[in-house]
Image (spheres, rainbow, N blue to C red):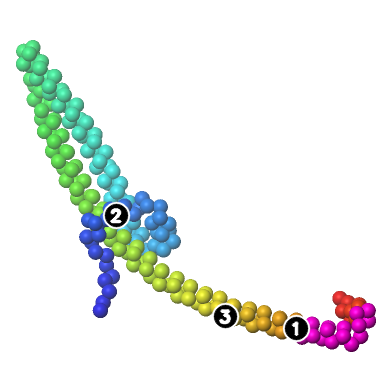
Amino acid sequence: MTRKSQLDPHIQDRKDIPLLIHEDVWLDFFNTYCNVWIKVKYSKLVRLDAEAKEIERLLESTKKDKKKNMNKVIVLSGMINNEGNEAALSELEETQALIQHLNNEIETLESRRLSVNERKRKLNFDILNDTVKIAYKEIKKQERILENISGEIEGLKEMLNRSIDRKHGIEEQKNQLYRLVHGLIGRDETNKMDDTYLET
């Protein structure tokens, strides 16, 4: 049975996946584990994100212009209808033409925004997929390292236990010898012998 090596694209519909280039945790990962392919995709995504922000800025500005000119149409229409100002007619026509132009601009920008956001979404998912693959590759490598370290620790524990047992055995032998000498020659003589033989 083969394992799936790609993420399910529908995860984007089920989970709100953030734009990775704005996530501190992902940026830490990027700085530590990224390869040349992720670097290329990262640069593309940064450019797309900048383009998306510029489109949003232009859209906001164009919509403000449209609103301003819509208000101007109301004023000019009032001047023509209520005051009979014929001179305002040509300005009204120019303003209406400008509004039509702005409508076309808005439509173009909204279409561009849709396209850029979709490209951002796909590229972000592509980077996410690469990130998951690299993360699991590193997890597997680190598991092997941890197994080796655990083996080393167990070996050190066994060595330490043997050293502790040996220490206890030597201490017991020393104490037995000391008790032997103490029993044979008594405390006072043992103290003198301590000073003679055990001086450091």
Question: Which of marks 2 and 3 precedes in the sequence?
Answer: 2
Q: Circles 3 and 1: CB distance less than 8 Å? A: no
- Relative vertical location of residue 64 with respect to residue 186 in this rendering, above or below: above
- Residue on which disc 1 sits: 172
- Relative vertical location of residue 162 with respect to residue 31 in this rendering, above or below: below
In the rendering, at what x and y percent does residue 97 appear? 10, 30
Q: Nearer the viewer, residue 35 or 175?
A: 175
Q: Is residue 94 left or right of residue 61?
A: left
- Residue on which disc 3 sits: 155
Measured Cα–Cα span from mark 3 to mark 2: 45 Å
In the rendering, at what x and y percent does residue 5 appear? 28, 70
SS for dot 1: helix
Question: Which of marks 1 and 3 precedes in the sequence?
Answer: 3
Amino acid bearing label 1:
Glu
Please state the extent of the stretch shown in magenta in the rendering: 172-189
Amino acid bearing label 3:
Gly
Residue at the image point whose x is 24% and y is 38% from the top: 58
Label 1: how many residues lie within 10 Å, few (<14), some (14-19) or many (20+)?
few
In the rendering, at what x and y percent does residue 3 appear? 27, 74
